[in-house]
């Protein structure tokens, strides 16, 4: 396989990384809000939180992407297909991240919040200063896992016309008749990127040791 | 007569269908140490937690320095819940120390003690940490300021927890079995800090199984049994003879735990 072909794959993989990174970040913000809503004592909030999760976790990502891609123009929103792709990935990963975070939030010991109550922290201050950091620490391994899943699932956005790593490999394989080399190279690139994510996760986890050996 | 620091009036607490406190009336005097003693399940911890509004009373009222905590009496005598900001304001007069310490694991000792000053009271970081250091010195842990809770012994963690409560300059300190999860050799260091606090004139309410501490340090002892306040009085009145038969029975269980000197 020529160097030129590999360079095209690397370029496409930047697209893969960019779309995944933006979606995971947006998903984390939405996921935090959704998990907070699911845990809220307010019934309407908790029902909407859980409905969000069951919808975006229950419908295949491929179907979600095709739905959003066709739905947005039908609603009069003529957005580039990359926006549709990021929207779909973000909403899907938000549902999974919300569930991971919900587990984290529920594992924060009650006594820590009683101490915060006695120290006068408001509900929001408790969330920001006590609950969120502890829940994040508890949820971190599953969040890294989810980041890797989304990076791989981002290959699905080719259905809305984005030429990311998998699609580029397919296109090049079709024109060069060298599918084995191209898909091996694409697989290797995914492997390297995910190895980087996992390593970043471990470094991040170490900063959450809080004095433990 | 001066106003009691805490006044409990007709307190009833139910968990579901089970009534655990059957109408408690108790005044905690200013500047004194009051101990709540009683067998397990007598409701003493629940009573203390009601005084901090960590448990909501099913009926009855609690006043902190004359101000209603959590609920005020409304029309037709039915208690009405006060707004959250009002609850926080009244509760700011109280500091609480827990059996399980409840230090925030992601903050150092200094971080735990300075947190509320920074977050709630908007004190600048440098000043908050200076004030936190003063409290850590008071409990003898200045040199452990940078340690995380996981790097401290149980006794040290509890002393940090006391410093954390003191940093907010409460008028009343509540202690919920502060030494129950400590090894005997670590119990002493926590009790010493509490003794020093009592000598400074802090109003304290202590739920404890340390009968020796109760007899030596408390000015008032309240004995609870089965959700009822059986008697209140000075240690002499409570532990002197003749003794309430239920109390006698209760103290018997402590004889082999080093309280023989009392009998």
Image: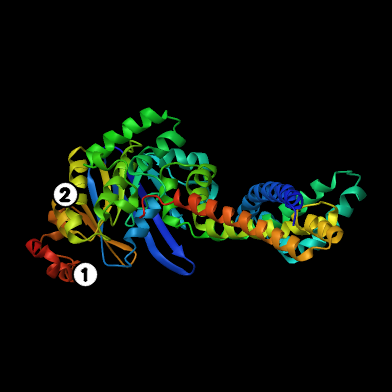
Tell me residue B26's x, y (percent). 31, 52
The residue singled out by tag 1 in the image is B246
Residue at the front extreme of this rendering: A2
The residue singled out by tag 2 in the image is B217
Q: Are marks 1 and 2 on the same chain?
A: yes
In this rendering, the answer to whether B187 lies above or below A123 is below
**Along the line of sight, which residue is nearer the eye, A192 or B27?**
A192
Tell me residue A79's x, y (percent). 86, 43
Tell me residue A212's x, y (percent). 36, 54
Is disc 1 surrounded by few (<14), some (14 to 19) or many (20+) residues within 10 Å? some
Is disc 2 surrounded by few (<14), some (14 to 19) or many (20+) residues within 10 Å? some
Q: Chain of mark 1?
A: B
Which quadrant does the N terminus of chain B fall into?
top left
Q: Residue at x 18, y 60 (%)?
A: B184
Left or right of A195? Residue A187 is right
**Along the line of sight, which residue is nearer the eye, B140 or B74?**
B140
Can I make out residue A134 in this image?
Answer: no
Q: Residue at x 43, y 60 (%)?
A: B13
Which quadrant does the C terminus of chain B fall into?
bottom left
Tell me residue A142's x, y (percent). 57, 60
Residue B200 in which image quadrant: top left
Q: Secondary structure at mark 2?
A: helix
Left or right of A190? Residue B114 is left
* Label 1 vs 2, first from the N-terminus: 2
**Along the line of sight, which residue is nearer the eye, B137 or B149?**
B149
């Amino acid at each position: 396989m020529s160097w030129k072909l590999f360079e095209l794959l690397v370029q496409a993989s930047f697209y893969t990384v960019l779309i995944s990174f933006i979606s995971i970040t947006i998903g984390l913000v939405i996921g935090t809000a959704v998990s907070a809503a699911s845990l809220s004592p307010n019934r309407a909030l908790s029902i909407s939180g859980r409905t969000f999760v069951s919808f975006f976790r229950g419908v295949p990502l491929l179907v979600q992407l095709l739905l959003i891609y066709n739905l947005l123009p039908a609603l009069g929103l003529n957005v580039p297909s990359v926006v549709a792709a990021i929207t779909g990935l973000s909403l899907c990963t938000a549902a999974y991240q919300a569930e991971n975070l919900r587990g984290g939030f529920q594992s924060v010991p009650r006594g820590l919040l009683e101490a915060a109550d006695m120290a006068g922290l408001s509900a929001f201050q408790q969330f920001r200063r006590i609950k969120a950091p502890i829940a994040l620490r508890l949820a971190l391994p599953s969040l890294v896992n989810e980041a890797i899943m989304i990076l791989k699932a981002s290959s699905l956005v080719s259905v809305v016309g984005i030429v990311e790593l998998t699609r580029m490999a397919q296109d090049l394989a079709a024109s060069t008749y060298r599918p084995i080399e191209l898909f091996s190279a694409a697989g290797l690139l995914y492997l390297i990127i995910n190895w980087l994510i996992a390593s970043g996760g471990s470094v991040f986890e170490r900063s959450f040791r809080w004095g433990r050996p | 007569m001066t106003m009691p620091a805490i006044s409990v009036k007709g307190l009833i607490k139910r968990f579901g269908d089970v009534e655990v406190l059957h109408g408690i009336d108790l005044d905690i005097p200013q500047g004194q140490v009051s101990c709540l003693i009683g067998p397990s399940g007598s409701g003493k911890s629940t009573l203390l937690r009601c005084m901090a509004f960590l448990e909501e009373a099913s009926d009855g009222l609690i006043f902190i320095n004359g101000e209603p905590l959590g609920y005020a009496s409304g029309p037709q005598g039915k208690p009405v819940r006060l707004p959250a900001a009002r609850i926080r304001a009244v509760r700011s007069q109280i500091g609480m120390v827990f059996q399980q310490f409840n230090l925030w694991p992601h903050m150092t000792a200094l971080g735990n003690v300075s947190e509320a000053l920074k977050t709630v009271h908007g004190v600048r970081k440098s000043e908050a940490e200076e004030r936190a250091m003063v409290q850590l010195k008071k409990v003898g842990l200045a040199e452990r300021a940078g340690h995380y809770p996981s790097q401290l012994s149980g006794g040290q963690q509890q002393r940090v927890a006391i410093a954390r409560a003191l940093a907010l300059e409460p008028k009343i300190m509540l202690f919920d079995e502060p030494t129950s999860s400590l090894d005997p050799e670590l119990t002493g260091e926590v009790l010493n800090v509490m003794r020093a606090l009592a000598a400074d004139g802090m109003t304290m309410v202590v739920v404890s199984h340390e009968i020796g501490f109760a007899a030596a340090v408390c000015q008032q002892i309240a004995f609870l049994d089965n959700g009822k306040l059986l008697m209140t009085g000075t240690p002499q009145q409570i532990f002197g003879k003749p003794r309430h038969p239920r109390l006698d029975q209760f103290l018997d269980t402590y004889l082999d735990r080093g309280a023989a000197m009392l009998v």
